[in-house]
Image (spheres, helix red, strand yellow):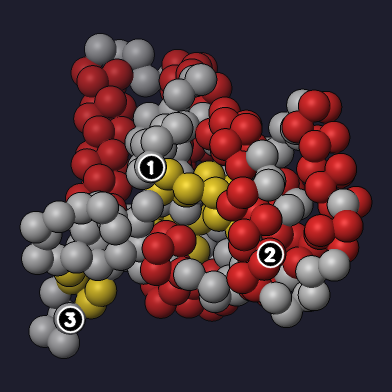
Amino acid sequence: MIYIKKEGLPNDISNRIIQLSKSEEWKNISEDDTDAIRYVFDNEFPKNDVKRVLLHEQHGICAYCMKRIRMDNHSRVEHLVPLSKSKDNAIDYTNMLGVCDGGERINGNQNHILCCDAQKKETEITVNPLDKTQMDKIAYDKEGRIYTKPRDEGMERDINNILLLNGIQKKDGTVRDTATELLKGRKDAYNRAKRMLGLLNAKGKCTSATVKKIMDELYNSDEREEYVGVLLYYLKKHYTSLVRRGK
């Protein structure tokens, strides 16, 4: 998970949403008529246009798990505050995120544990990729587990029990990964960052300036690497250490 900075909608898309919000059809829908609200969102709201903006501002990765998402049926528009909980937020772009399908379309996987929005459904959560203070608490260990540092019980509850970003821990202590293999993907990213620094060390080029340049390139890439947050987390720890040692 990584902080997402909203870019804003182009005027033409924004104006279409404003007109929709002012329409008699929308005004006549009651706050608790979830079916009618969802119908308008699916059929009248410029969903695909907004989705393109979401994918662009998220650099092509899922807001929750950081897997690759594109303009296809494996991605979706997610409401941070669920559509069923708030009529106004249902067509508010600032309440929307681009997310993966959570593994729903994967066939033949015995460990079919869904994640992200597919698991969250209509549950309200505390963890918010749009909140930089929260995202600064996100950490990863060498096994690919995501956690918070300092510990935030609300965020960890959402990560582990609602979004299932760490899979499911079985009674024998082992873990079943999600259908999308999030733990494996994050562990591979962690090891990739470790190897990256190892190569720099071997060449005598592991300086704060070099590590900062790599971090900037990863962060600013038009299409970020999957699990980029893991790479940045690992590199940032070592960058801070290098700066402290004056290297």
Q: Which residue is mark 1?
A: 73
Q: For residue 128, which numbered disc appears in the image?
A: none
Is 46 above or below relative to 130?
above
Decide: few, some or many residues near mark 2? Use Cα within 10 Å; few <14, some 14-19, many ≥20: many
User: Which residue is more in the foreground, 236 or 36?
Assistant: 36
- Measured as percent of width and height from the top left, residue 82 is found at 62, 67
The answer for how far apart the CA atoms under marks 2 and 1 are is 21 Å
Q: Which residue is mark 3?
A: 170
- Measured as percent of width and height from the top left, residue 126 is found at 61, 70
Is 4 above or below relative to 70?
below
Q: Disc 3 residue type?
A: Lys
Q: Which residue is mark 2?
A: 37
Camera-side mark, 3 or 1:
1
- Measured as percent of width and height from the top left, residue 86 is found at 74, 70
Which label's residue is closer to the chain start, 2 or 1? 2
Q: Residue at x 47, y 53 (%)?
A: 64
* Residue 208 in view in this figure: no
Q: Residue at x 81, y 47 (%)?
A: 20
- Which element is circle 1 on? loop
The answer for how far apart the CA atoms under marks 3 and 1 are is 31 Å
Q: Residue furthest bottom?
A: 171
User: Which residue is more in the foreground, 26 or 1?
Assistant: 26
* Residue 70 in view in this figure: yes
User: Which residue is more in the foreground, 18 or 228?
Assistant: 18
